[in-house]
Amino acid sequence: MTTATLEKPAPAAPSLAPSAQANRPTGPKAACLLMGLDLGTNKSCVLAGSPGSSDITVSKVVPSVVGYVKDGIVDGIITGNAKVLFGEEALRQMLHVELAVPLAEGVISHPEAARDFMLHLRQLADPSGRSEIRAVVGVPANAGEQAREAIRRAATGIFSHILLIPEPFLAALGYRDDARVRQPGYVDPVVNSLFIDIGGGTSDLCLVQGYFPTRDDQISIPFAGDAIDALIFDGLNRTYPNNGLSLITVREIKEAHAYVGPSRKPLEVKVVIGGKSRTLELGDAIGNACNALIDKIYPALTALIASASSDSVVTLLQNIIVTGGGSQIRGIDTVLQKKLADEGYESPRVRLAGQDFQRYVAMGALKAARAARENQWQVLLG
Amino acid sequence: MGRVYRRICFLRFEGRGTEATQIEFTELKEAVDAAKGQTPSGPEADSILKRLLEEEGERVADAVAFAEAIMPYLPDHLAATQPALSPSTLGIYKGLKDGPRPAGDTRTVADFIDDMLAQDRPRAR
């Protein structure tokens, strides 16, 4: 059974579950607030703003994690004796909570945590809880109907309207500098570009050529940041057995030292094991894991380039953009560019999206929310 | 594994090479790895795998040939049972794969969303 949705607004509010009623605006005229939401496997980004303006009133990046406080925790240990914590706060209190991760490989894997997390994001955007919220939510390229339905289900009673749009297209929309679109010389990423969005769960590649990408224009690979963490973790355990380092620590090490290309040694990392400081040589463990990502995404990149028309491909090759957390891997742009050049592609240029890499999908989502026509929204019936 | 490979063959027959490549890199690779994990590796296992994939490829080729044979009879049948596609929907799909749109052809974000919803409709049925 699927969540009830309509493509046009319902004339009257349907009955809602009690928990949903508490989150819905009260009174005859609730203000409308638009949200752009990038639900990531490791980090999520929420942007919010009013319709009819270009202002962004809320912009937050939150680790995608929910902490359910364990029974028997002494009063005062958890601020306000909260029962559920989110994001950084949940990670800070990891000894006192059961951590739950709402998403795996870009799709909802823990429905209850996903719902609680979405409610938290709503509260960040609308602390008063009185606004009617319309949210555009990014989904991985080629996300199936089951994954989309899981998001709608989690969002029911939290948002009034929803629109699900593939993330790589939203990244292109978010990356687009609207003020320069009509300026001569500006290469509009929405007109002809290839986006590589490397997240925690999936790496999504997408051709954006002035029309909405078809399924053939998008490739989603279930290998991204989490898979790299796991490979580094395994490599570390082979070289330094019983090191006791957690996956969270390994992720922090990766975020500080990730690279692709030729081996970078020495790459010495100081860690604390069993209370003692130790220096580990991680050049190979990190390099091998990150280079595995190149092996996965490069064939998909060339497959998409091959599918572009001959009239567009030369410009397209100048406009390959890497975004998402994976864009922070040192050398990823130059390694991909060199591989393309070495294989004879015409003057390829691979660029990094830049410092807002965590926000482009949500920025695109908020732009889409502001532009969506009334009949394009799906009404979530609680 | 056979089912996944049949899907890949069918997508290639339809000219949807990118989608086929995507499944080959992900689902088929996982299925092959899983199958290899359950049987002793070696030339015999490789030969069995090769034969299986060839057989599946032939099954799809036969199915496509059959579909081509009955295709001339389908329009009359569909006309009687399916509503016609609206001109606006046909317009959205027309030219989708013609490469980037020419300069000056300014489309709004809402137009893109219309494209997306039109693509989603057949999937949601």
Image (cartoon, rainbow, N blue to C red):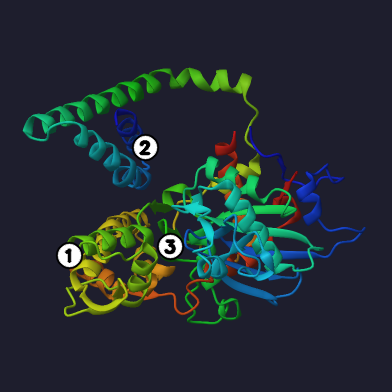
- Dot label at residue B11: 2
Foreground mark, 1 or 3? 1
- How many residues crowd mark 2 within 10 Å: few (<14), some (14–19), many (20+)? some
Q: Secondary structure at mark 3?
A: loop
- Left or right? Give the position of A167 relative to A319: right
Quadrant (top left/top right/bottom left/bottom right) for the N terminus of chain A: top right
Cα distance, mark 1 to mark 3? 27 Å
Sequence-wise, the earlier of marks 1 and 3 is: 3
- Dot label at residue A239: 1
Foreground mark, 3 or 2? 3
Q: Is residue A274 above or below residue A221?
A: below
| Tag 1: amino acid | Thr
- Residue depicted at 29% across the width and 37% down the height: B31
The answer to whether tags 1 and 2 share a subunit is no
| Tag 3: amino acid | Gly
- How many residues crowd mark 3 within 10 Å: few (<14), some (14–19), many (20+)? many
- Residue depicted at 64% across the width and 36% down the height: A2
Image x and y of residue A260, in percent: 25, 71
- Left or right? Give the position of B66 relative to A87: left
* Quadrant assignment, res A352: bottom left
Determine the chain carrying the residue at label 1.
A
Residue highlighted by disc 3: A199
